[in-house]
Image: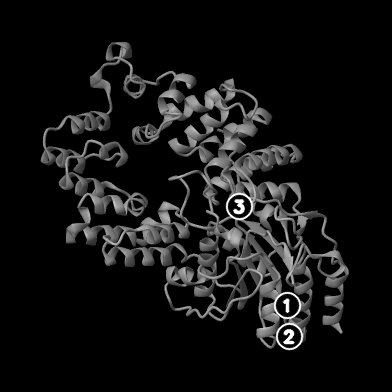
């Protein structure tokens, strides 16, 4: 009787949809705070399958206007940068804070704008006028000046890589007052001023790293360059243009961090570095170094991207190291309280780049379906009794071995599908195939753009709900039939990896919606399935801020 009562309460709150998603399907709208968190954790201001980057910007402005909570905006900026590992959205939230609460903006500025690339992104956003002005406000200018004076020499040199805007543009608008002659000389060198305009600083005041970099560029032999590189700790990008052959490139490779090595394997191969067995051993060792992988804060899917993109000339040993690195990157994914059904959306819209369309040569080769498959593989590795169901408008049979490497499983799962989207399929299929198996819940990994139900486009589910909610009702009823009074009801988790503002299953006691494609998502999922009340918005609000700068 208790189980019937529980199920009855779930059925009684089955609500009608209140909107349509970008694909035209029936859907539920996120609350503003949740929608903003979803956008901040997944949006890159690039074109997605259903919307352009300008749509994301308009949605961001709209949602910020609806969220009358500056503390939440500050915490979300930190969450998006430190836990979701995003770059553009956190900078945009700093822009918004700079006009709404300058004190909060200063408190979180250095945590969000933590490297030169994000600094230049913020500068570009301000200069564009999309946030109300085309120049730095006095408050933002102070924040920029502080950053430029406090940044290490290495961080400033790294910030000088790239243009439009360049660090020179930033320095000229921010106009920082140098704190000493070393910084005065460095600012003069970075902005291309003549030495006599650095006064009272001189060329001798330049930091040792800059003087070594200048000597490297003037060196007349590969041996001389290689000797300088061995003692020079700057980003490899600053050395590449002047490098004189493979001897120098080998020295550069030894100065690269694991992230730079991962991203430039084809470059190293092209310059003959990987023809040296010793260098192959070195690169493979750095790529698979567990401590460095955790310190680098890399998405697990980025190792998949590297694996998919390496040329045939890259040695197998290094490809194997990428497999090991992906295993380590996924290693902090928690064990769930029981097996789950994992639905992997393999529909046509999931073929879009996970970071959106940027134009030829700039778009990530990693698709949404690759990320979904990698997430599924990672969950399966830690929870091997779980089952994976790839789907579009039908379910596919995926024969995967949980003991296979995560990259191998992900690559296999990503090969299914390509049709329309019916997010109810894995629920319905699990009820058929595994009717007599108990599950802790269901995890759907999708872009949430479901528009088909039981082969009928734009069709309602029961009582005007979505197909997902209708099938979830059936799934729960059967699961409660299998369990005793001491068995908790299953829970549904919808992981959304695209910046849209709707869901197929509204937030309630047994349903969690969360967005993003970093492994921070799994912390919330595991807590939810283990009966912790934490939700996506609560996770953002748990961010602690310092009392002041």
Q: Are marks 3 and 2 in contact (CB under 8 Å)?
A: no
Of the two numbered discs 3 and 2 on the same chain, state the one appearing first in sequence: 3
As rendered, which of 385 and 371 lies closer to the eye?
371
Picture quadrant where residue 538 is located: bottom right
- The residue carrying mark 1 is 488
Task: Say the numbered circle drawn on residue 483.
Answer: 2
Q: Using residue 79 as the reference point, say whether residue 279 is left or right of it.
A: left
Quick one: label 2, few (<14), some, or many (20+) residues within 10 Å?
Answer: some
Q: Please, is residue 285 above or below residue 355 in the view?
A: below
Q: Are marks 3 and 1 in contact (CB under 8 Å)?
A: no
In the rendered view of the protein, which quadrant contains the C terminus? top right
| Residue 440 x, y percent position in the rendering | 66, 76
Q: Nearer the viewer, mark 3 or mark 1?
A: 3
Q: Using residue 360 as the reference point, say whether residue 130 is left or right of it.
A: right
Q: Using residue 459 as the reference point, say whether residue 250 is left or right of it.
A: left
Task: Say the numbered circle drawn on residue 361.
Answer: none
């Amino acid at each position: 009787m208790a189980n019937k009562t529980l199920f009855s309460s779930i059925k009684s709150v089955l609500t009608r949809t209140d909107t349509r998603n970008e694909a035209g399907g029936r859907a539920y709208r996120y609350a503003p705070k949740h929608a903003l968190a979803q956008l901040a954790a997944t949006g890159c201001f690039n074109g997605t399958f259903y919307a352009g980057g300008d749509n994301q910007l308009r949605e961001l402005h709209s949602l910020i206007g609806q969220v009358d909570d500056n503390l939440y905006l500050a915490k979300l900026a930190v969450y998006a940068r430190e836990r979701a590992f995003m770059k553009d959205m956190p900078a945009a939230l700093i822009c918004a804070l700079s006009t709404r609460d300058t004190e909060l903006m200063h408190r979180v500025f250095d945590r969000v704008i933590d490297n030169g690339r994000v600094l230049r992104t913020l500068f570009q956003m301000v200069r564009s006028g999309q946030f109300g002005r085309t120049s730095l406000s006095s408050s933002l200018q102070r924040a920029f000046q502080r950053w430029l004076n406090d940044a290490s020499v290495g961080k400033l040199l790294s910030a000088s890589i790239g243009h439009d805007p360049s660090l020179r543009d930033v320095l000229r608008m921010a106009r920082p007052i140098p704190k000493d002659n070393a910084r005065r000389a460095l600012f003069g060198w970075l902005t291309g001023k003549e030495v006599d305009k650095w006064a009272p600083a001189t060329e001798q005041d330049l930091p040792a790293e800059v003087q070594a970099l200048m000597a490297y560029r003037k060196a007349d032999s590969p041996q001389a360059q290689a000797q300088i590189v061995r003692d020079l700790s700057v980003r490899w990008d600053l050395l590449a243009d002047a490098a004189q052959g493979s001897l120098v490139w080998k020295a550069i490779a030894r100065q690269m961090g694991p992230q730079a090595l991962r991203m430039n394997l084809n470059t190293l191969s092209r310059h003959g570095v990987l023809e040296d067995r010793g260098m192959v051993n070195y690169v493979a060792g750095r790529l698979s170094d567990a401590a460095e992988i955790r310190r680098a804060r890399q998405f697990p899917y980025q190792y998949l991207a590297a694996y998919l993109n390496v040329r045939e000339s890259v040695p197998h040993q290094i490809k194997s190291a990428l497999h090991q690195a992906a295993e380590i990157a996924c290693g902090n994914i928690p064990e769930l309280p029981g097996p789950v059904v994992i639905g992997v959306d393999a529909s046509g819209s999931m073929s879009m780049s996970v970071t959106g369309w940027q134009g030829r040569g700039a778009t990530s080769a990693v698709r949404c379906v690759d990320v979904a498959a990698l997430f599924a593989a990672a969950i399966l590795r830690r929870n091997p009794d779980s089952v994976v169901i790839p789907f579009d408008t039908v379910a596919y049979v995926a024969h995967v071995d949980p003991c296979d490497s995560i990259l191998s499983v992900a690559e296999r799962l990503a090969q299914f599908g390509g049709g329309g989207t019916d997010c109810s399929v894995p629920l319905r299929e699990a009820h058929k195939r595994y009717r007599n198996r108990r599950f802790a819940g269901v995890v759907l990994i999708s872009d949430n753009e479901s528009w088909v139900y039981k082969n009928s486009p734009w069709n309602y589910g029961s009582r005007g709900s979505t197909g997902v909610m209708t099938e979830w009702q059936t799934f729960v009823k059967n699961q409660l039939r299998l369990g005793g009074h001491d068995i908790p009801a299953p829970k549904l988790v919808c992981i959304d990896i695209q910046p849209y503002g709707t869901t197929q299953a509204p937030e309630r006691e047994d349903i969690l919606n969360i967005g993003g494609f970093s492994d921070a998502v799994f912390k919330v999922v595991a807590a939810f399935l283990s009966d912790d009340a934490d939700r996506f918005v609560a996770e953002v609000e748990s961010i602690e801020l310092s009392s002041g700068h």
